[in-house]
Amino acid sequence: MRHRLIPVEERRLMHREYYMRLAIVSVCALAVAVTAGAIALFPADIRARAADNAALQAVAAARKNSGLSDLNQAEQQLSQGRTLLAALQTDASQARFSAVIRSIVNIHSPVMISSFAMGRAGSSTVDVTLQGIAPTRNDLLAFKGRLEALSPGSTVDLPISTLAKNANISFSLKLTEPLK
């Protein structure tokens, strides 16, 4: 906009008028955008107010109906909780044999187990009786060592008479393992 023929004072007035018109157009565009946004949000505002009124009415109705029914419901829930806790307490006191069985099954050995019996020896120990056939005396002794190493405090009772044979040994051993 550098016109040589327009005097300097008039050029300043043109620049000022140009920026004023730019500001007026920007303010008008902003006003239109705000109006369009308000119109777009109006239905959501109506729905939110309706949901708020419905929730307030439900609270008021619940306050009117409260009384002995709430107390009875609370008592029923407490009695159900007590029975559930009693059932869980008796279940927790029973021995979990699955961990003992899993640990014995995970021992890889050439020993063949033909019989497996479990019982609770005391409040904190489990007795496991294993019967089977071992290919050699060394295999049977290695199996006994692996059973003893299952958990700290476990003991294996293997009669000495079982070790009299050198091959194809029929054995019966008793493993006493503490419960975890």
Image (tube, rainbow, N blue to C red):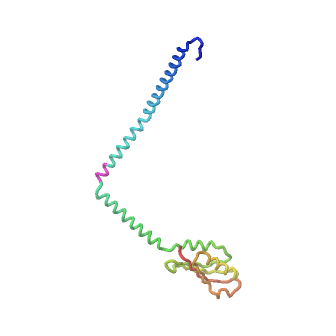
Q: Residue at x 45, y 33 (%)?
A: 37
- Relative vertical location of residue 114 with respect to residue 6 in this rendering, above or below: below
Query: Residue furthest toward the top?
Result: 5
Q: Quadrant of the N terminus?
A: top right
Q: Residue at x 39, y 41 (%)?
A: 48
- Relative vertical location of residue 119 with respect to residue 20 in this rendering, above or below: below
Residue in front for this viewpoint, 149 or 101: 149
Q: How many marks?
A: 0
Query: Left or right of 101: which side holds 168?
Result: right
Q: What is the x, y in percent for residue 122?
A: 50, 80
Query: Left or right of 154: which side holds 135?
Result: right
Main SS type for the magenta part? helix
- Relative vertical location of residue 174 with respect to residue 61 in this rendering, above or below: below
Answer with the quarter of the image where residue 74 lies: bottom left
Q: What is the x, y in percent for residue 156?
A: 60, 81
Q: Residue at x 37, y 41 (%)?
A: 50
Residue in front for this viewpoint, 7 or 146: 7
Q: Residue at x 40, y 38 (%)?
A: 45
- Relative vertical location of residue 97 with respect to residue 27 in this rendering, above or below: below
Q: Is residue 116 magenta?
A: no
Answer with the quarter of the image where residue 40 lies: top left
Q: What is the x, y in percent for residue 153?
A: 57, 78
Query: Residue furthest toward the front?
Result: 8
Q: What is the x, y in percent for residue 27?
A: 47, 26
Please report the bounds of the magenta region as a residue range. 60-65
